Image (cartoon, grey):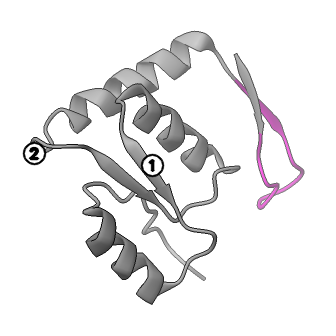
């Protein structure tokens, strides 16, 4: 079981409990999508914060898949593109939602 906290963007911060069953279901879903990737070593580039719930679950999924994880210290477009080419990245978890 995990206890993750919301940022409080829409109110007070709240603790959210995720059970072992939730974690296994999420990882299973991620692994089934990952199996569709082309052959070769699976290399993930992380430009998302690992303390965020999305980063946390992406980290677990990549570890469960036996992937290599490349982590950049901060987001920099030129550095990201260079890392994609240098490490031959196959996966780039990112959020492309609305920005205000």
Picture disc at residue 38: 2
Quarter of the image with the N terminus in it? top right
Instruction: Name the front one of labels 2 and 1.
Output: 1
The quadrant of the rendering that contains the C terminus is bottom right
Q: Position of residue 62 (x, y in %)?
A: 41, 38
Image: 93 above or below 65: below
Q: Which residue is mark 1?
A: 69
Q: Residue furthest bottom?
A: 78
Q: Nearer the viewer, residue 82 or 76?
A: 82
Q: In this rendering, would 60 be left or right of 10?
A: left
Q: Please state the horizontal and vertical placement of residue 53, each as a whole percent of the image.
A: 63, 44
Predominant SS along the magenta part: loop
Tell which circle, 2 or 1, labels the residue nearer the N-terminal end.
2
Q: Residue at x 35, y 80 (%)?
A: 81
92 is higher (above) or lower (below) than 37: below
Q: Quadrant of residue 78?
A: bottom left
Residue at the extreme left of the image, as rendered? 38
Q: Secondary structure at mark 1?
A: strand
* Residue visible at 38% across and 72% down in the picture: 83
Find out whether residue 69 is within the magenta segment.
no
Residue with the most extreme top position = 21
Q: Nearer the viewer, residue 20 or 41?
A: 41
Asked whether, in this view, residue 26 is left or right of residue 35, the answer is right
Please give left or right for residue 30 compared with residue 96 in the image. Answer: left
Q: Answer with the quarter of the image where residue 35 lies.
A: top left
- Percent x, y of residue 55: 57, 49
Residue stretch rendered in magenta on the structure? 5-17
What is the CA distance from the residue labelled 2 to the residue labelled 1? 17 Å
User: Does the segment drawn in magenta span residue 16?
Assistant: yes
Which labelled disc corresponds to residue 36?
Answer: none
> Do the residues bearing badges 2 and 1 touch, measured as CB atoms within 8 Å?
no
């Amino acid at each position: 079981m995990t206890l993750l906290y919301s940022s409080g963007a829409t109110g007070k911060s709240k603790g959210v409990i995720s059970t072992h069953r939730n974690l296994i279901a999420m990882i299973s879903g991620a692994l089934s999508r990952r199996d569709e990737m082309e052959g070769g070593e699976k290399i993930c580039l992380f430009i998302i914060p690992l303390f965020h719930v999305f980063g946390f679950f992406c980290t677990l999924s990549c570890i469960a898949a036996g992937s290599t994880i490349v982590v950049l210290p901060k987001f920099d477009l030129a550095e990201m593109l260079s890392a994609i080419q240098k490490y031959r990245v196959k996966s780039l978890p990112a959020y492309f939602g609305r920005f205000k």
